[in-house]
Image (tube, rainbow, N blue to C red):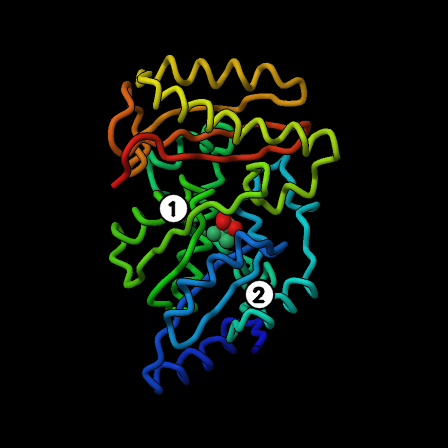
């Protein structure tokens, strides 16, 4: 497995692969890898060469967020990727991606200001910027992301379409712990009591799915049930619970085809997100 730290070095490798007509897939990550990340490697293996990037992207963190404390278990991540047959890891320094004088950011309008964008107004601009840069540097035919970051996947698909990028975005299902908690690098911030309380996200998704099965399809009724349930957990504080169209994140009044229930909840100081499709999904 090759570890590449600079863009210049990656370009040499990439043109060598191009000379051999090899296809390339990319799994972008911020490291602190878990089974959710490993599940993204499966479809990425369809390419001749599989690249994983590890970069804790400063532009997607707000001023009071966890950039400095974000877990960086690099040795562990690299050995996991090596054991999982990754061909190259792109591991740039922040100054390589954002050199002094860097001034360009990518904004995907409207979609970026909904859901997580309300409490994290600059987050998706940072995500879109770094992912576009990674696409330009690595030039993958396929890029694989996780459904847990549902809004991110909608925004990146929009960016790919709007900017005519030659990359196919593939989205893989959420991977969960046995009690339903969605895997996340931030779960390691939780203490024992918080870890237990964090199942409230999955329980809320299950509650809404069950209510829908029993015939309740009004969004406001379902969301108010979810709010109540989250309110009943003393360690939880709701950021948002919304039911939206999964394709374009627009609000829906009635759950029909392609509805998505998306949640962000603080458990103690840790903000967790989760989501589930409701109804039939296209
Ligand atoms: O999903 C993530 O881990 C990040 O948002 C990504 C796509 C690697 C961009 O920094």
Determine the residue positioned at 41% across, 85% down: 16
Quadrant assignment for the N terminus:
bottom right
Packing grade of label 1 (10 A; few <14, some 14-19, many >=20) is: some
Callout count: 2
Q: Quadrant of residue 247?
A: top left
In this view, 45 is above or below 188: below
**Image location of residue 12, percent across then percent down:** 46, 81
Determine the residue positioned at 36% across, 14% down: 220
Nearer to us in this view, 109 or 252: 252
Q: CA distance from mark 1 to mark 2?
A: 23 Å
Query: Image check: 104 left or right of 201?
Result: left
- Quickly name the residue at label 1: 153
Respond yes or no on whether mark 2 lies under 8 Å from ligand 1. no
Mark with earlier residue (1, 2): 2
Query: Image check: 185 left or right of 258?
Result: right
Which tag is nearer the camera, tag 1 or tag 2?
A: 1
Quadrant assignment for the C terminus:
top left
- Is mark 1 in CB contact (under 8 Å) with mark 2? no
Identity of the residue furthest to the right in this view: 192
Dot 2: element:
loop
**Image location of residue 258, percent across then percent down:** 28, 34
Residue 92: assigned label? 2
In this view, 184 is above or below 132: above
Q: Quadrant of residue 91?
A: bottom right
In this view, 165 is above or below 241: below
Nearer to us in this view, 82 or 16: 82
Nearer to us in this view, 149 or 115: 149
Q: Quadrant of residue 61?
A: top right
Dot 1: element:
helix
């Amino acid at each position: 497995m090759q570890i590449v730290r600079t863009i210049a070095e990656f370009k040499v490798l990439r043109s060598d692969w191009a000379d051999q007509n090899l296809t390339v897939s990319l799994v972008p990550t911020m490291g602190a890898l878990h089974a959710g990340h490993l599940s993204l490697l499966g479809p990425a293996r369809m390419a001749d060469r599989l690249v994983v990037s590890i970069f804790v992207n400063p532009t997607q963190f707000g001023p009071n967020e966890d950039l400095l404390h974000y877990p960086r278990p690099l040795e562990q991540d690299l050995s996991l990727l090596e054991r999982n047959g990754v061909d190259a890891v792109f591991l740039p320094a922040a100054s390589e991606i954002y050199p002094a004088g860097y001034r360009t950011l990518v904004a995907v309008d409207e979609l970026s200001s909904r859901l997580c964008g309300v409490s994290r107004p600059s987050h998706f601009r940072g995500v879109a910027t770094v992912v576009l840069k990674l696409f330009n540097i690595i030039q993958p035919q396929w890029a694989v992301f996780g459904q847990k970051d549902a809004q991110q996947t909608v925004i990146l698909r929009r960016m790919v379409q709007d900017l005519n990028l030659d990359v196919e975005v593939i989205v893989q299902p959420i991977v969960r712990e046995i009690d339903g908690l969605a895997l996340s690098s931030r779960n390691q911030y939780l203490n024992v009591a918080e870890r237990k309380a964090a199942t409230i996200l999955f329980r809320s998704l299950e509650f809404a799915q069950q209510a829908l099965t029993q015939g309740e399809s009004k969004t406001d009724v379902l969301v108010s049930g979810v709010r109540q349930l989250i309110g009943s957990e003393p360690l939880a504080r709701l950021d948002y619970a919304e039911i939206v169209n999964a394709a374009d994140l627009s609000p829906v009044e009635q759950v029909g085809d392609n509805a998505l229930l998306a949640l962000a909840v603080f458990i103690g100081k840790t903000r967790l997100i989760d989501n589930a499709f409701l109804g039939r999904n296209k």
